[in-house]
Image (cartoon, rainbow, N blue to C red):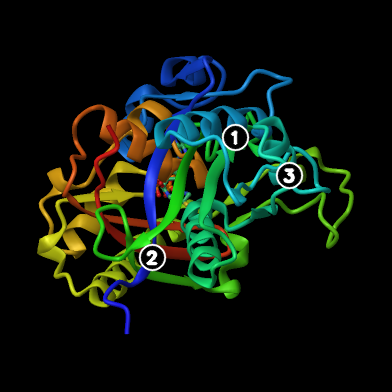
Amino acid sequence: MSATTRAAVLTGLGSTVPDQVVTNAMLASRMDTSDEWIRSRTGIRERRVVEPGTATGDLATEAGRRALKSAGVDAVDALVLATTTPDHTCPATGPAVADRLGLGTIPAYDVAAVCSGFLYALATAAGLIALGTADRVLVVAAEAFTTIIDPADRTTAPIFGDGAGAVVLEAGDAAQRGALLGFDLGSDGALADLIIVPAGGSRRRTSADPAEYFMKMRGRTVFTNAVLRMASSSRAALARTGWKPGDVDRLVGHQANVRILRAVAEELGLPAERAFVDVDKYGNTAAASIPLALDDAASSGLLTAGDRVLLTAFGGGASWGAVTLEWPDLS
Ligand code: COA
């Protein structure tokens, strides 16, 4: 028997956000809200918003390029793209991103799990590696999420923003730093209406009400479910890893709301400082938020090699997930 266990190991990381900054004050000048309300309820100060003409595929290509550079590679065996806002309803955006990155005719596809999308994409990429179908996979999570947000809706416009993050996973050993250790994933379709774009899909192809082409959210119910599911999924992933909650050096949760992140840390018995927060700068970038946060945390020195890291997310579907890893040396 082999002494090593094949695992998917994180070897590269990159991210990008659009240049356009929209502050809370800018939103307050065009709708009935205030900087104080948004900051105290969500922790968000500003967000990045794509200009018309910039699509998810543009952000995904740039984040992917940066992750490949960070890993020091120019070829991969597969690309998995997590997004809620593909460039087109058909086809998937992943193949176009692979083409633009010069990755050839590799398998490339999209994963749709809204704010949990990055964790779902990581799991499918790790599965390709476990099967031996791929030795190296580029996992990208990208959103032009504001394209499905009603700019006049004060219950969603302050919350969401645009961005992209990407990681390279390579076949390695479970004992290596960067190996993805314990996964947990789940969903509850009975909660599908918590976060929903009512029209434009096959269920309701057209609507006379333009607002139905934008996302609706039952914010308060999302909040309570997010805390419960992120905490329980985290516990399941930790148990599979053989870690106790207190072993976690850095909780990098989906950046939806600073109050959700603090509540998840509290549920796990972790000091609030162990929860990384950058929702203040970017808002909720859906699938992109975790890899964007990882890049932000790593570049600001808040993630260092050997840190025991817990990632967790909750989002539309409803869907949720968590995964653990020891942070690798990416320098
Ligand atoms: N500015 C000012 N007031 C606002 C507002 C805004 N942008 N949005 C809502 N309000 C008002 C509501 O109308 C309501 O007024 P009322 O009491 O007179 O009825 C009041 O503020 C409270 O609204 P509520 O929705 O109960 O607030 P909340 O404390 O739950 O905060 C969210 C709202 C959206 C910030 C919060 O529920 C949340 O963060 N939910 C999770 C959202 C999320 O992260 N989604 C993606 C997860 S993947």
**In the image, which is nearer the foreground, mark 2 or mark 1?**
2
Could you say where residue 225 lies in the image, as x and y percent from the top left? 41, 64
Name the residue located 18 percent from the left edge and 40 percent from the top edge: 304
Question: CB of mark 2 within 8 Å of CB of mark 3?
Answer: no
Tell me which corner region of the image, top left, top right, bottom left or bottom right, holds residue 291. top left
- Other-residue count near label 2 (Cα within 10 Å), few / some / many at <14 / 14–19 / ≥20: many
3 vs 1, front mark = 3
Q: Secondary structure at mark 3?
A: helix
Q: Which secondary structure lies at badge 2?
A: strand
Of residues 169 and 324, the one nearer the viewer is 169
Q: Which mark is residue 95?
A: 3
Q: Is mark 2 within 8 Å of ligand 1?
A: no
Residue 165 rendering spot, x and y as whole percentages: 48, 37
- Upstream in the sequence, badge 2 or badge 3? 2
Q: Which mark is residue 60?
A: 1
Q: Quadrant of ligand 1?
A: top left
Residue at mark 2: 7
Amino acid type at circle 2 is Ala
Report the Cα–Cα distance between label 2 and label 3. Answer: 25 Å
**Secondary structure at numbered mark 1:** helix
Q: Three-letter amino acid code at disc 1? A: Ala
189 or 33: nearer the viewer: 189
